[in-house]
Amino acid sequence: MKNNYMIILRYDGSRYDGWQKQGNTSNTIQARIESVLEKMTGEPVEIAGSGRTDAGVHAYAQVANFHIRENLDPGEIKRYLNEYLPQDIRVMSAEKAAPRFHSRLNAVSKKYVYVIDNAAVADPFRRKYAFHHPGRLDIEVMRAAAAYMTGEHDFRSFCSNKKMKKSTVRTIYGITIERKGEEIHIVVDGDGFLYNMVRIIAGTLIEAGEGTRQPAEISDILEHRDRAFAGPMAPPQGLFLMEVKY
Amino acid sequence: MKNNYMIILRYDGSRYDGWQKQGNTSNTIQARIESVLEKMTGEPVEIAGSGRTDAGVHAYAQVANFHIRENLDPGEIKRYLNEYLPQDIRVMSAEKAAPRFHSRLNAVSKKYVYVIDNAAVADPFRRKYAFHHPGRLDIEVMRAAAAYMTGEHDFRSFCSNKKMKKSTVRTIYGITIERKGEEIHIVVDGDGFLYNMVRIIAGTLIEAGEGTRQPAEISDILEHRDRAFAGPMAPPQGLFLMEVKY
């Protein structure tokens, strides 16, 4: 019986090709962590994340788990990973998990934040952590549009994968939109998210805030179940996976 | 009579060799801005900053001025610079200045902040904008030590330039030390600063916070007028030039 460990990760996704290991690149968060764990344990390790983050997308608290033969102290795993991982990937905590715990399958909800830098001139300190959109955005209209998205809906129109065969029905528990200084933070809480769903939601809400789309149009977009009807996909650097609940 | 312009700059100093143009490198903030202004005006331009920031040091609001022959609209200068400068250097504002205005000579006070990431695990989003110091820091003791630094003193012990020939007497109007979440912000307000002075102040206050130096020792350090008696120089990434007053 192998030992199962759960780790909470914080990473700056700017220079990575996303979370998931892919055929011809080892420049992913997953590959970096597996490589350090394999060095530590001397065995092949496969790490499961709660979900994939795209290239350039960040995580404030991504959850992942992995099984290894050796019974290691979680504190030792955390120290070893933080010593050998690059500084833009940090292990915030590590603990033993129940044998059948799976970070993706057992997740019951996730929270993302999409950050817009709404200042006239882009803040150089936020250029990798926010989408600079200097135009006027009416957050009351954005909130009205967001209200049409909350609840259980078929979000096929908000999914980049056009060949998605599984159910595209998801429940959004809430979307809050707040100004924080010159930034606008869109927080989306839901039971699960389709490919690029939060970034398409953000892009569509930005159109509403600009006044180029009426809040009530959201119902039509959802009904069409066709990606072509939703707004553009907002760029990756504004998106953070904030929390995964089990 | 040439036209004098004042610009306020915000920059992420991470990848630059500091503010000042130097013999064998053009990788300085000053050189980048001059090169764009020369392209715009077709004449050689020399830009004066309110002070030099070291390699890796940031500016939230650096002030600079320059003279050009042509009478250009300040808004046009701002737009042109922000179009051609790299994204980690931004012009927040540009305006016409009085003919004799000089950003360094006319400055009456400056404010710096030194940011310490005091969390157990370094925040990857703050790794270029804070000094990670995970040990316990007693900010009450730091405040007591800082109180010995405020007022008019000879700060020769807090200056990296051992051959400094000019006066090393400066006045610190105030030092405030606050916790902001897991960070500690040291704000230093004074009439002028010697080479590396704020970073040596920060390094010395950190020693006080660690308990390895008593607040009252600050008086002895100042009296010795010798760099060897002060604490280490804190690393550049925690330092921001916040404000210059005229």
Image (cartoon, coloured by chain):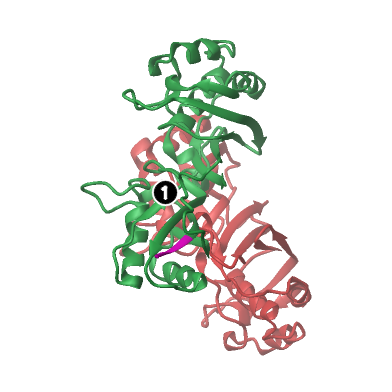
Chain colours: A red, B green
Considering only vertical position in the picture, is A158 above or below B34? below
Whether residue A1 is visible here, answered yes or no, is no
Image coordinates of residue A19 in percent, x first then y, are 46, 58
Image coordinates of residue A131 in percent, x first then y, are 55, 66
Task: Check residue A30 for magenta coloring.
Answer: no
Pointer 1 local density, CA inside 10 Å: few below 14, some 14–19, many at least 20: many
Residue that appears at 49% across and 73% down: B73
Lateral position of residue B20 relative to residue B246, left or right: left
Lateral position of residue B177 relative to residue B195, left or right: right
In the rendered image, the residue lying farthest to the left is B24
Q: Amino acid at mark 1?
A: Gly
Image coordinates of residue B215 in percent, x first then y, are 59, 14
Considering only vertical position in the picture, is B96 above or below A204? above
Question: Disc 1 sits on a residue from what chain?
Answer: B
- Residue A164: image quadrant is bottom right
Residue behind mark 1: B13
- Secondary structure beneath dot 1 equals helix
Q: Please provide the residue range marked out in magenta.
A: B1-5
| Towards the viewer: B230 or A44 | B230
Residue that appears at 62% across and 54% down: A242
Considering only vertical position in the picture, is B230 above or below B220? below
In the rendered image, the residue lying farthest to the front is B1
Considering only vertical position in the picture, is A132 above or below B244? below
